[in-house]
Amino acid sequence: MIADTGFWVALFNAGDRWHQTASRWLSGYDGRLICTWPVLTEASHLIGAYLGPAKARRFVAAIQQGASEIFPLGQGELARITRLMKQYQDLPMDLADASLVVVAESLGHGRIVSTDERDFRTYRWNRYQPFENLLAPLSPPF
């Protein structure tokens, strides 16, 4: 399962409106999670900014202990990421989101856990394939 930044932030932030949804979903999931360095960087920054450096360290330690695999992005993926960021510039698409489209294309599926319903409802992998956001049906009320 592909894991987006918002999913990680919600897990580590008990005050996030998505916290219970993300926690409940994860407790019922027994597969592997995968994300990218841009997602980890973004999540670590947001967790640290909102919850402090100790919580950011806990997040990094959880990843180090196997909470998620890290997809190996290399120089070869940058051309595709650049094209995606240009294609979705009106949203706009950031590096972390573009990296997850590349992951979906590599894995051959778009199953994702994300709190970003708008963007991952809009993005397409392999040009035409929609993402399936497994958190969206569980969306908490505003």
Image (cartoon, rainbow, N blue to C red):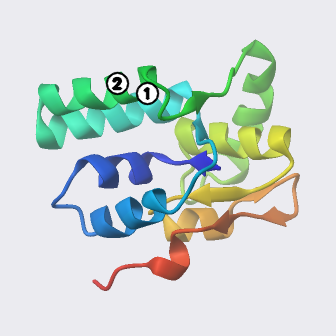
Q: Residue 28 location in percent, x, y?
A: 50, 63
Q: Amino acid at mark 2?
A: Val
Q: Which residue is mark 1?
A: 63
- 38 relative position to 77: left or right: left
Q: Quadrant of residue 119?
A: bottom right
Q: Residue at x 83, y 38 (%)?
A: 106
- As drawn, 135 above or below 13: below
The residue carrying pointer 1 sits among few (fewer than 14), some (14 to 19) or many (20 or more) residues within 10 Å by Cα, namely some
Q: Secondary structure at mark 2?
A: helix
Residue 91 lies in quadrant: bottom right
Indicate the secondary structure of the residue bearing disc 1. helix
Q: Residue at x 23, y 62 (%)?
A: 16
Q: In the image, what residue type sits under mark 1?
A: Ile
Q: Is residue 5 left or right of residue 35?
A: left
Position in image of residue 56 (x %, y %): 24, 29
Callout 2: few (<14), some (14-19), or many (20+) C-alpha neighbours within 10 Å?
A: some
Q: Position of residue 37 (x, y in %)?
A: 53, 25
Q: Marks 1/2: CA distance?
A: 5 Å
For the C terminus, which image quadrant? bottom left
Residue name at image x 54 percent, y 38 percent = 96
For this view, does 66 lie left or right of residue 44? right
Query: In this rendering, is residue 8 above or below 129?
Result: above
Can you give x and y, in whole percent of width and height, for residue 84 in the image? 72, 44
Dots 1, 2 in contact, CB < 8 A = yes
Query: Disc 2 marks which residue?
Result: 60
Relative to 118, residue 81 above or below: above
Left or right: where 68 falls relative to 47: right
Residue at point 39%, 66% (across, down): 24
- Outermost residue toward the bottom? 141
- Asked if residue 89 is positioned above or below residue 85 in the image, the reply reads below
